[in-house]
């Protein structure tokens, strides 16, 4: 994300120090954010960049905070810089943290079964699952589908019993 | 003259009563806490769903009367025949369950832009997978057919089931 701010400034013909729109200011701020989503939000520097008063800049930052678009870090007293974390999507980025196993690590029987949604193809899919050599994962076939398979005659109750599916 | 309450034990019994009851006649179909009791009781769930369907159609009127007796904190659930409204013959004659009727109705009366699976999902408030399975069940019974250019729609048999 670093370096995007300069591109945005160039692409939108923005002149630092001239009066910017709020939308342009937000785009520039997002472009300023680093890989972790952090960007410096010093109201003095931003006011100079956007050509706004410091009061307007503060109101703009307060508005972004209220709307949940940025989360400002509480600054310790002293001359340290003020930073904010930018919300890019539904949630704030949380670094490189990963949760849960990857798709490769999930056991084959735990993967979701992607059955076709068209009724004729779906019936054929589950009928093939019951009559095929592979074991049927527990809970893969709902009671409604079991009734549909039996009423269509695609499988027999014995075949279902062999696969451990309650009919 | 004393009025003794009538009770029904299951959906078949309730439908039998509803088909023959004169206007004003009422029946108690459950005593307890219906919301809780129907969770683990498929037969009671089906019965309550049938009462709800017929009350939506104006054929019966559902009511609950609180009971506060020693050791009992619940209600008695009664259905009264209204003398108006209508009831699908397929429900009264137990050819369909209320849930299946709702699914058929949803497929038949859905908007043209909506898929049959989505109509079932939204009507029955069930997950996509279960809605697809229900559509499969309707298809396997021959009540739903693939109409070229129109998606899945009701077959003549399905339409008869809806009435």
Image (tube, rainbow, N blue to C red):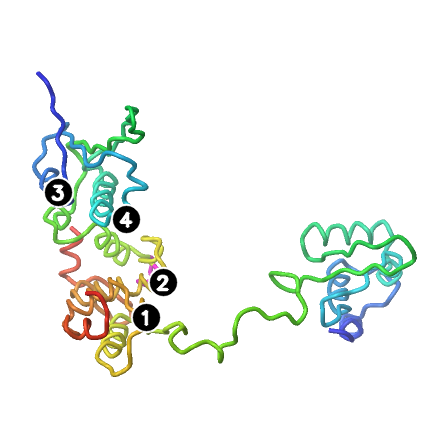
Q: Are marks 2 and 1 in contact (CB under 8 Å)?
A: yes
Circle 4 sits in a helix, a strand or a loop, which is it? loop
- Tell me the CA gap for discs 4 and 3: 22 Å
Residue drawn at 22 percent across, 55 percent down: B100
Using the image, determine if residue A24 lies above or below residue A126: above
- Tell me the CA gap for discs 2 and 4: 22 Å
Q: Nearest the camera: A131 or B161?
A: A131
Circle 2 sits in a helix, a strand or a loop, which is it? helix
Furthest-right residue in view? A79
Q: Which chain carries label 2?
A: B
Residue to which mark 3 is pinned: B15
x%, y% of residue A59? 79, 49
Residue drawn at 87 percent across, 66 percent down: A16
Neighbour tally class for label 4: few under 14, some 14-19, many 20 plus, Cα within 10 Å: few
Q: Are marks 2 and 3 in contact (CB under 8 Å)?
A: no
Neighbour tally class for label 2: few under 14, some 14-19, many 20 plus, Cα within 10 Å: some
x%, y% of residue B135? 26, 64
- Tell me the CA gap for discs 1 and 3: 34 Å
Q: Mark 1 lies on which chain?
A: A
Residue to which mark 2 is pinned: B128
- Quarter of the image where the N terminus of chain B is located: top left
Residue drawn at 15 percent across, 55 percent down: B161
Residue to which mark 1 is pinned: A117
């Amino acid at each position: 994300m670093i370096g995007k701010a300069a591109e945005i400034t160039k692409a939108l013909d923005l002149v630092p120090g001239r009066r910017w729109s709020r939308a342009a200011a937000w785009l520039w701020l997002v472009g300023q954010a680093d890989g972790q989503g952090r960007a410096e939000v010093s109201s003095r520097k931003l006011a100079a960049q956007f050509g706004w008063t410091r009061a307007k800049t503060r109101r703009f930052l307060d508005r972004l905070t209220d709307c949940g678009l940025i989360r400002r870090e509480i600054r310790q007293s002293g001359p340290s810089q003020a930073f904010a974390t930018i919300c890019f999507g539904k949630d704030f980025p949380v670094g490189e943290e990963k949760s849960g196993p990857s798709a490769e690590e999930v056991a084959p029987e735990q993967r979701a079964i992607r059955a076709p949604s068209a009724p004729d193809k779906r019936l054929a899919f589950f009928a093939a699952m019951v009559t095929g050599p592979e074991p049927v994962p527990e809970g893969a076939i709902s009671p409604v589908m079991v009734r549909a398979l039996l009423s269509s005659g695609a499988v027999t109750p014995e075949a279902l019993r062999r696969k451990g599916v309650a009919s | 003259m004393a009025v003794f309450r009538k009770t029904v034990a299951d959906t078949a019994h309730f439908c039998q009563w509803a088909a023959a009851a004169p206007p004003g006649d009422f029946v108690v179909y459950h005593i307890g806490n219906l919301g809780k009791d129907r969770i683990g009781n498929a037969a009671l769930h089906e019965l309550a769903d049938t009462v709800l369907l017929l009350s939506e159609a104006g054929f019966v009127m559902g009511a609950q009367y609180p009971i506060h007796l020693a050791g009992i904190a619940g209600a008695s659930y009664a259905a009264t025949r209204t003398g108006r409204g209508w009831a699908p013959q397929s429900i009264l004659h137990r050819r369909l369950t209320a849930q299946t009727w709702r699914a058929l109705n949803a497929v038949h009366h859905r908007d043209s832009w909506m898929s049959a699976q989505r109509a079932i999902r939204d009507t029955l408030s069930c997950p996509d997978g279960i809605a697809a399975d229900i559509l499969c069940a309707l298809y396997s019974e021959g009540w739903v057919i693939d109409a070229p250019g129109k998606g899945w729609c009701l077959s003549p048999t399905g339409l008869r089931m809806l009435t």
